[in-house]
Amino acid sequence: MLAFLVFLTFLLLYMILAVYAERKVSAFIQDRLGPMEIGPYGVGQTVADLLKLLQKEDIVPQAADRWTFMAAPLIIFTAVFAGFAVMPLTPDLQGSGAAIGVFYLLAIISIDIIGLLMAGWSSNNKYSLLGAMRSVAQIISYEIPVALTVLCVAVYCQTLNLQEISFGQGIYANAVTREGQDQITNYLFGIKALGIDVTQLGGVFTWNIVRMPLFGVVYIIFFIATLAESNRAPFDIPEAESELVGGFHTEYSGFRWAMLFLAEYGMMLLVSMLGAVLFLGSWNTPFPNLGPVRLADWTSGAPGTMYGNITGAFWLILKAFAAIFVQMWVRWTYPRLRVDQLMHLCWKVLTPVSLVLLFLSALWRMLG
């Protein structure tokens, strides 16, 4: 329950911050100012827009399938929010320490496809239906490279528990006393660089993306595929305003449209946090213990302490926000792909390369 309240509150605050940040990032890229009217530098603009949405009439088209139309946004948001249940925010704060957390996460967020199809079909609008069909085809396709890249990490780490993967990338690897201790021990076996035990060195040297040479390419594929999973440009063909008005959410207004908007930004945060946990050291500090100044020790508190939870949440959120900034940067830099280009990239580029990387990761693990 504590994790539920923490993540729900954080998600709402994050959306207000992220919408404002995206407006400012897009304005900077396009050489303009962005929102400037409400509050200093327009900081109150997102709050004003949110209040406006909450006061708008909830319109249901006369020819729509009423109950399906009304339920779709709830299903989409619930599917995305449920993914945070297994996400470790700190060494001690995690909704569920399920041993198959990665599998659960990939399975539960797939349910949003049902909500997207419900939203498009029930609207009885040709633009909504086309947008929903595009979205379903895109998300189902790009789930394959996402799953393969995540599987690369699971094969290398020998666990599906996100918290165990997090402990394995820092100086507190030996602090794990749960059932997965054997997997962590195997995961750390033989991981040394020039005779130095990198688990004691800490910092970026223990991150999967640094310790495993292939994971740099794996993370790039993961990032591209999760952009498509989030319906973010240049993979935003389900919402192509120039072609489909608004795509699957064309007929939505007020609070239900806000829920769809919140689900999209929630998916951005979820995949960014997942990428940080799998590849970028999770809640562990980026500073190593080099020389007499042991930065890793005092910039990452011990598990079970208040300081450890504060620093852990800080580092994980900072890494996730950095990935979100890159997502925004990409959106306002690259043009939208055509449907055929999008499918070509998935099936003929990302998926074959992911399969090869999975084989190499398994081979690396078997030999190492």
Image: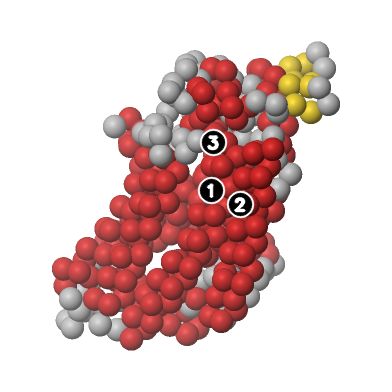
Circle 3 residues within 10 Å: few <14, some 14–19, many ≥20: many
Q: Residue at x 16, y 68 (%)?
A: 67
Q: Quadrant of the C terminus?
A: top right
Distance (Cα) linking label 2 and label 3: 13 Å
Disc on the earlier residue, 2 or 3: 3
Q: Which residue is mark 1?
A: 151
The residue under label 3 is which amino acid type? Gln
Tell me whether the residue at label 2 lies in contact with that at label 1, contact meaning CB atoms closer than 8 angstroms: yes
Picture coordinates of residue 262, whole percent (x, y): 39, 56
How many marks are shown on the rendered structure? 3
Q: Is residue 106 above or below residue 232?
A: above
According to the image, what is the colour scheme of the structure?
Answer: secondary structure
Residue 332: give its label: none
Q: Image check: 127 left or right of 88?
A: left
Q: Earlier in the sequence, mark 2 or mark 1?
A: 1
Residue 336 in the figure: left or right of residue 87: right
Which residue is depicted at the point 47% across and 48% down?
Answer: 270
Q: Which residue bears the numbered disc 3?
A: 158
Q: CA distance from mark 2 to mark 1?
A: 7 Å
Q: CA distance from mark 3 to mark 1?
A: 10 Å
Q: Position of residue 285 (x, y in %)?
A: 64, 29
Q: Evaluate if marks 2 and 3 touch, with contact meaning CB atoms under 8 Å apart.
A: no
Task: Pinpoint residue 342: horizontal percent, then vertical percent.
Answer: 57, 75
Can residue 95 be seen here?
A: no
Type of amino acid under label 1: Leu
First along the sequence among labels 3 and 1: 1
Residue under the image location 20 percent in, 74 percent down:
60
Mark 1 closeness class: few <14, some 14–19, many ≥20 residues within 10 Å: many
Q: Which residue is mark 2?
A: 358
| Callout 2 amino acid | Leu
Q: Nearer the viewer, residue 320 or 111?
A: 111
